[in-house]
């Protein structure tokens, strides 16, 4: 059986994120649990792999297994959460002081809880049906938007106090700032997609929805695949590539070595 446009995009997602997963996992292993932004980024790539695999399988398996569609769509719709939370965690890394302490710890923990709440609302809203499910999906995506705005404000605060940011963490802040416009488009697409229909029901090999005519083309499931490709897949992929490049090239651990050299230059080896 041949794949439709959604199935082809799912297969492409599976193909491009499979190698990226190993790069992300390598970076996460390099920095360990202390820098959870890389771990969350690895989880995001894994979600994209599993989601793509489920949607491809949903179109290939006969008789139709509706759960494959629901699982694939749920992972696709909720994938924005780990990408935002990864960005948030990386931003928190830029607040790290020379003595290893992370500033604004309580605020960042609350923001991560906000991201988790948005994720739960989105998944439950997709899995269930009825007006309450629609409300949960829309509440979830609004929380995503709020989290994005807060991340932008946090980046602005860090730039305002950039003299206190260590060398390589300042470069990480640059990478985050480069990714933010693409993340904005991705977040906007989630909003438009979620508000484009009041319900969606997966039946057999198609997904039907009660769509808002003006926003119907932005629907993640039944809208125009070209818009989905440009505003969803490409935006995510660019963000991930920026973070992978930063994680692979920046020597964040050397910030402490540089600090030691500045504090005790006579005890440090010249380079």
Image (tube, grey):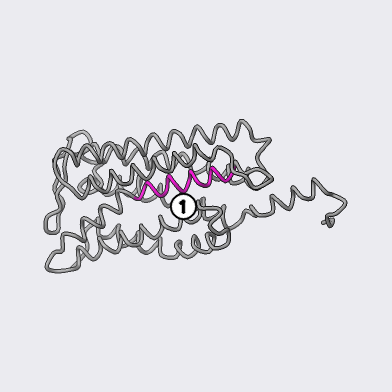
Q: Is residue 32 above or below residue 86?
A: below
Instruction: Give the x, y percent position of residue 33.
Output: 53, 57
Direction from residue 5 to residue 185 in the image, left or right: right
Q: Is residue 220 inside the magenta stretch?
A: no
Q: Nearer the viewer, residue 48 or 235?
A: 48
Q: Give the residue displayed 31% in from the left and 39% down from the top.
A: 141
Q: Is residue 66 above or below residue 219?
A: below
Instruction: Give the x, y percent position of residue 14.
Output: 35, 62
The C terminus lies in which quarter of the figure?
bottom right
Instruction: Give the x, y percent position of residue 90.
Output: 53, 47
Q: Is residue 73 above or below residue 59?
A: above
Instruction: Give the x, y percent position of residue 49.
Output: 35, 61
Q: Answer with the quarter of the image where residue 148 lies.
A: top left
What residue sits right under mark 1 in the picture? 240
Q: Nearer the viewer, residue 185 or 153?
A: 153
Q: Nearer the viewer, residue 1 or 51?
A: 51
Q: Give the residue displayed 45% in from the left and 53% down from the top.
A: 40
The N terminus lies in which quarter of the figure?
bottom left
Direction from residue 45 to residue 162 in the image, left or right: right
Direction from residue 183 to residue 164 in the image, left or right: right
Count of residue discs: 1
Q: Which residues are magenta?
A: 79-94
- Name the main secondary structure of what is drawn in magenta: helix
Q: Residue furthest right?
A: 266
**Few, some or many C-alpha atoms within 10 Å of disc 1 (few <14, some 14-19, many ≥20)?**
many
Q: Is residue 93 inside the magenta stretch?
A: yes
């Amino acid at each position: 059986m041949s794949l439709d446009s959604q199935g082809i995009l799912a297969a492409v997602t599976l193909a491009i994120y499979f190698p990226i997963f190993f790069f992300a996992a390598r970076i996460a292993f390099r920095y360990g649990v202390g820098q959870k932004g890389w771990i969350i980024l690895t989880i995001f790539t894994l979600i994209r792999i599993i989601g793509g695999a489920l949607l491809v399988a949903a179109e290939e398996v006969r008789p139709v297994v509706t759960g494959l569609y629901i699982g694939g769509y749920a992972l696709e719709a909720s994938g924005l959460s780990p990408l935002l939370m990864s960005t948030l965690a990386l931003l928190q890394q830029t607040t790290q002081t020379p003595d290893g302490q992370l500033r604004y710890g309580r605020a960042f923990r609350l923001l991560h809880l906000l991201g988790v709440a948005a994720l739960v609302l989105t998944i439950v809203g997709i899995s269930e049906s009825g007006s309450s499910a629609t409300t949960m999906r829309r509440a979830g995506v609004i929380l995503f938007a709020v989290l994005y705005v807060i991340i932008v404000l946090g980046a602005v605060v860090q730039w305002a106090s950039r003299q206190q940011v260590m060398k390589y963490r300042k470069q990480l802040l640059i990478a985050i700032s480069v990714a933010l416009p693409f993340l904005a488009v991705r977040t906007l697409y989630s909003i438009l997609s979620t508000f484009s229909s009041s319900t969606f029901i997966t039946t057999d090999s198609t997904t039907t929805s009660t769509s808002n005519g003006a926003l119907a083309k932005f629907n993640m499931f039944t809208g125009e695949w070209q818009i989905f490709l440009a505003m969803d897949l490409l935006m995510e992929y660019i963000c991930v590539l920026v973070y992978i490049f930063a994680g692979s090239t920046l020597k964040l651990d050397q910030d402490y070595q540089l600090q030691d050299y500045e504090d005790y230059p006579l005890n440090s080896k010249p380079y």
